[in-house]
């Protein structure tokens, strides 16, 4: 029972959506930033002279970092959710 | 509301390279990873169907928004932007936000606190099992058909943009959706929806920004729209609606009552695929906040759909012309024109993910209603929970296979699919009539629920078939939708009243918690610490969304 509970907690933590989104955007951001720095003149001309990969990459890095930070600062408390399962866990 | 997308132009293919495919692959690996992780958290049927009622309002709110913000919606709204101009904002500011606020403030407490799993189950509690079954069957059939239409539209997009063969696209997409819904149930469907929302924004914002730069900013865009086929009326939302002399060809009464009331309330307040997002919230307050949290981004979405639509209109002179590109091609054309590899991959990923999220929403709505409202309620009651969890997984498999079948039929008879899609856009109007009367009139009887719903649904079908057969003349499909919805609503209401007067009502004791003014005192207060704060007040935030919506209209009058 308690082991089951532990798995459940780990799963909660592991797939906290903020981590997933944050992680995905950090990776995307890193890729786009590098690509943006190396973009060819043709790519620049296509995007009206804007280094759009670089800007989008940096924005996605910032966004991803924000989500990861949010998860770090306010992690999910598995006890506070699913209060239905445990009626003694009432909050005022 | 669902929108029709057919992309068939031959020269839409994008210049994607390995980098873009890497971005795409990364996304779908993450999605499958979530499915696997979610599987470990899914132990009961409640976990599978309603995410264990554990999600905070920001997740359910974004999922609520994303369940609607499918790719058909985005491409369709950009198309409307190119075709009708600024007036397209009506679909958001009056056609969505008021109904979303109404759902959160008035209706969600009834849904959530009655502990139902689905909209049909609510109908059983308020009316009877027959009403539940009627609604469950029409809903289940509609979800499968819409899932198939989504799948077919997705395959068309993959074919047009990436050059994938139709069959391959259908099978690969269906397999991905199947994998993550079977593994994680509603949780992974919802997680994917929220992720998809951010990824598609990450693709649409660069399109919008670069598009605006290309046409010379907002003022340059306005100038060029004035000189386009749309002209000055394309820049206004309300001007000319007193006479019907505007790009929509609609009167303001039609916009307010037809779009803003019957169509929009019908869709947003009774569509189970939407309501389900609220039901998965962790408590009543989070459930009520779900549609309201979604209302704020919804107000802003036109910036990345209508503006690109207008940009495409002025950039591509053949858009919407016979022999040229269709209006639906607006966003893919801009992507091909403006986005270099890299960010192009992100935009393509967002688009494909959003089609799949749309299909996953249909499938997870279907498996819930099939399991709870058809099988558990009417075929095999009283089985252990594990039985229904397994059944739900099998229903998912069946739903996806049926969706693939529908997609294949759609590829052969695309006209029929177009008709169906238009029909489903006002399919919920009679259901809304039944709900709203049942909610506020406690005398309304169980059989009135059944006959009202049946006659309203038949009326919706009949009006549309008569329109398509040429017996009734509503002019455009858009107008036919409005009249069909209105007819269905009125027929439902009249039959409801007549049958109520002839049959016996339910005793008040059975209606507690289901009807306005009859509260159920046995339901415990489930509020969490912090729910009293002003920023978690549904009424205050809801009113705020309405005010912002009204203010946004000012510069575009």
Image: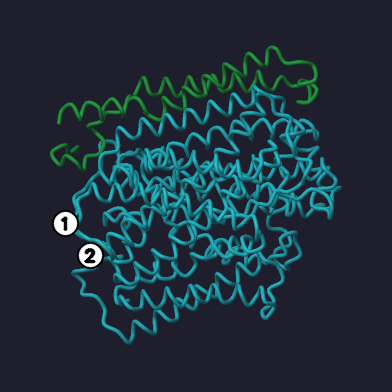
Chain B display color? cyan
Q: Dot 1: what SS?
A: loop
Which mark, residue B512? 2
Which percent across, then down, holds residue B418? Answer: 64, 61
The number of discs equals 2
Classify residue B110 as left or right of residue B322: left
Mark 1 to mark 2 CA distance (whole Å): 10 Å
Q: Is residue B514 left or right of residue B435?
A: left
Q: Earlier in the sequence, mark 1 or mark 2?
A: 2
| Dots 1 and 2 on the same chain | yes
Residue B522's mark? 1
Q: Residue at x 59, y 54 (%)?
A: B408
Q: Which chain does tag 1 point to?
A: B
Residue projecting furthest to the left: A88
Viewer-proximal residue, B158 or B343?
Answer: B158
Q: Sort mark 1 into few (<14), some (14-19) or many (20+) by Cα contacts within 10 Å.
A: few
Numbered mark located on residue B466 in the image: none
Image location of residue A53, percent across then percent down: 67, 21
Colour green belongs to chain: A
Q: Going 49% across and 46% down the picture, which residue do you hit?
A: B295
Residue sitting nearer the eye, B198 or A8: A8
């Amino acid at each position: 029972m308690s082991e089951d509970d532990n798995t459940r907690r780990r799963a909660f933590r592991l797939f906290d959506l903020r981590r997933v989104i944050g992680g995905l955007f950090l990776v995307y951001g890193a890729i786009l930033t590098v690509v943006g720095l190396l973009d060819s003149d043709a790519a620049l001309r296509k995007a009206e002279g804007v280094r759009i990969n670089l800007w989008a990459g940096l924005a996605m890095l910032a966004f991803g970092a924000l989500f990861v930070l949010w998860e770090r600062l306010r992690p999910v408390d598995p006890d506070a959710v699913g209060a239905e399962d445990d009626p003694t866990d009432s909050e005022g | 509301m669902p929108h029709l997308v057919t992309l068939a132009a031959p020269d839409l293919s994008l210049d994607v390279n390995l980098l873009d495919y890497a971005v795409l692959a990364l996304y779908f690996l993450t999605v499958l990873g979530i499915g696997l992780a979610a599987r470990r958290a899914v132990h009961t049927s409640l976990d599978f169907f309603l995410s264990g009622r554990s999600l905070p309002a920001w997740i359910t709110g974004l999922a609520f928004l994303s369940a609607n913000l499918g790719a058909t919606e985005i491409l369709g709204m950009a198309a409307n932007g190119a075709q009708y101009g600024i007036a397209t904002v009506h679909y958001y500011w009056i056609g969505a936000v008021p109904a979303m606020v109404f759902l959160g403030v008035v209706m969600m407490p009834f849904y959530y606190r009655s502990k139902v799993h689905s909209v049909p189950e609510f109908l059983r509690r308020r009316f009877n099992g027959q009403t539940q079954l009627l609604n469950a069957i029409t809903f289940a059939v509609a979800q499968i058909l819409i899932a198939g239409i989504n799948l077919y539209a997705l395959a068309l997009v993959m074919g047009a943009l990436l050059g994938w063969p139709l069959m391959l696209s259908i099978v690969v997409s269906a397999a991905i959706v199947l994998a993550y819904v079977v593994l994680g149930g509603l949780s992974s469907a919802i997680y994917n929806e929220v992720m998809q929302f951010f990824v598609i924004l990450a693709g649409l914002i660069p399109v919008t920004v670069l598009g605006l730069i290309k046409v010379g900013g907002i003022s340059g865009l306005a100038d060029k729209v004035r000189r386009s086929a749309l002209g000055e009326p394309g820049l206004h939302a309300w001007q000319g609606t007193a006479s019907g002399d505007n790009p929509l060809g609609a009167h303001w009464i039609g916009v307010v009552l037809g779009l803003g009331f019957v169509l929009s309330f019908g869709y947003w307040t009774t569509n189970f695929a939407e309501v389900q997002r609220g039901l998965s919230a962790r408590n009543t307050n989070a459930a009520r906040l779900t549609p309201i949290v979604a209302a704020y981004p919804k107000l802003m979405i036109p910036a990345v759909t209508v503006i690109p639509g207008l940009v495409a209109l002025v950039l591509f002179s053949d858009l919407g012309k016979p022999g040229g590109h269709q209006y639906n091609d607006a966003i893919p054309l801009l992507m091909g024109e403006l986005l270099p590899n890299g960010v192009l991959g992100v935009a393509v990923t967002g688009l494909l993910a959003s089609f799949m999220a749309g299909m996953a929403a249909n499938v997870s709505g279907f498996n819930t209603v099939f399991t709870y409202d058809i099988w558990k309620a009417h075929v095999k009651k009283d089985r252990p929970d594990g039985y229904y969890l397994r059944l739900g997984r099998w229903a998912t498999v069946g739903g996806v296979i049926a969706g693939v079948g529908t997609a294949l039929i759609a590829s052969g008879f695309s006209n029929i699919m177009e008709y169906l899609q238009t029909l489903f856009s006002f399919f919920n109007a009679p259901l809304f009539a039944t709900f709203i009367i049942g909610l506020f009139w406690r005398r309304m009887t169980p059989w009135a629920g059944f006959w009202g719903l049946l006659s309203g649904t038949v009326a919706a079908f009949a009006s549309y078939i008569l329109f398509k057969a040429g017996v009734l003349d509503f002019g455009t499909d858009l107008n036919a939708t409005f009249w069909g919805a209105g007819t269905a609503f009125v027929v439902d209401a009249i039959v409801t009243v007549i049958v109520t007067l002839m049959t016996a009502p339910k005793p008040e004791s059975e209606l507690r918690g289901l009807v306005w003014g009859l509260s159920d005192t046995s339901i415990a207060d489930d509020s969490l610490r912090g729910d009293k704060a002003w920023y978690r007040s549904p009424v205050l935030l809801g009113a705020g969304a309405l005010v912002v919506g009204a203010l946004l209209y000012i510069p575009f009058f």
